[in-house]
Amino acid sequence: MPSRYAALLRGVNVGGAKRVPMAEWRALLEAMGCAKVRTLLNSGNAVFESPLRSPAMLEAMIHGSLARSLGVDVPVIVKPRKTLAAIVAGNALAAKATDPSRLLVAFTRDAESLAALAAIAPLAKARERFHLGEHAAYLWCAGGILESQAAKALLGTAGREATTRNWATVLKLQALLEAL
């Protein structure tokens, strides 16, 4: 039986660089043998089924295919359905977040990259909260993402091994994944 996955691309379709049309993203995944492919928004989110059992192998295959087919070299993070469910369940900040667009979830490929995000915690000021969970990092930007130094670090160089999505998008991804 195939496994279900969410794939997240970092930094695509922001400005004019690293364009990945969603129809081509779906077709690329299907050409790799993925089934029931669905994309969400225009920012490199996809859910699918695959007979492959290794997220790392899927990440490498997707990364290579994006580079060959579309000329786009971006980090790819693949999370199995159960891990995405654990990320949702492990959000200790969900109850504090009054606006899901201001609650960021940072996804990384591995535990080492996730642990490195701890350096962002001291940047969270005033009403902001940072939580390093078992499978993801969470940042509540009460005053807005653009005003947050911690968010700037997470979205910039300090978070280069991560990709972030707001809480509303994470919940939509989980719902799509469960509906496959």
Image (tube, rainbow, N blue to C red):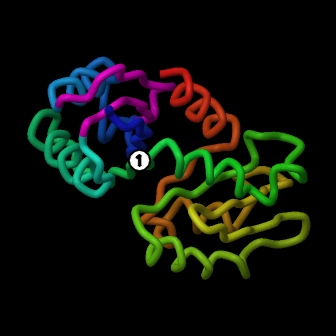
In the image, farthest residue toward the left? 68
| Residue 43, horizontal then vertical, whole percent | 45, 34
Quarter where residue 70 is shown: top left
| Image vertical order of residue 98 relative to residue 142, above or below | above
Q: How many marks?
A: 1
The amino acid marked with disc number 1 is: Gly
| Residue 32, horizontal then vertical, whole percent | 16, 32
- Determine the residue positioned at 79% across, 60% down: 92
| Residue 137, horizontal then vertical, whole percent | 63, 64
- Determine the residue positioned at 22% across, 48% down: 63
Question: Which of 88 and 161 lies nearest the eye of the viewer?
Answer: 88
| Image vertical order of residue 49 relative to residue 106, above or below | above
In the image, farthest residue toward the front? 1
Whether residue 50 is in magenta: the answer is yes
Q: Is residue 147 left or right of residue 177?
A: right
Secondary structure mostly seen in the magenta stretch: strand
Q: Which residue is disc 1 drawn over?
A: 11
| Image vertical order of residue 169 relative to residue 27, above or below | below
Magenta region: which residues? 33-51
- Determine the residue positioned at 44% across, 46% down: 80
- Determine the residue positioned at 62% across, 53% down: 87
Q: Is residue 146 left or right of residue 38?
A: right
Q: Residues within 10 Å of mark 1 (few under 14, many from 20)?
A: many
Quarter where residue 12 is shown: top left
Local secondary structure at mark 1: loop
| Residue 81, horizontal then vertical, whole percent | 50, 42
Q: Is residue 70 left or right of residue 23?
A: left
Q: Assign the N terminus to one quadrant of the image.
A: top left
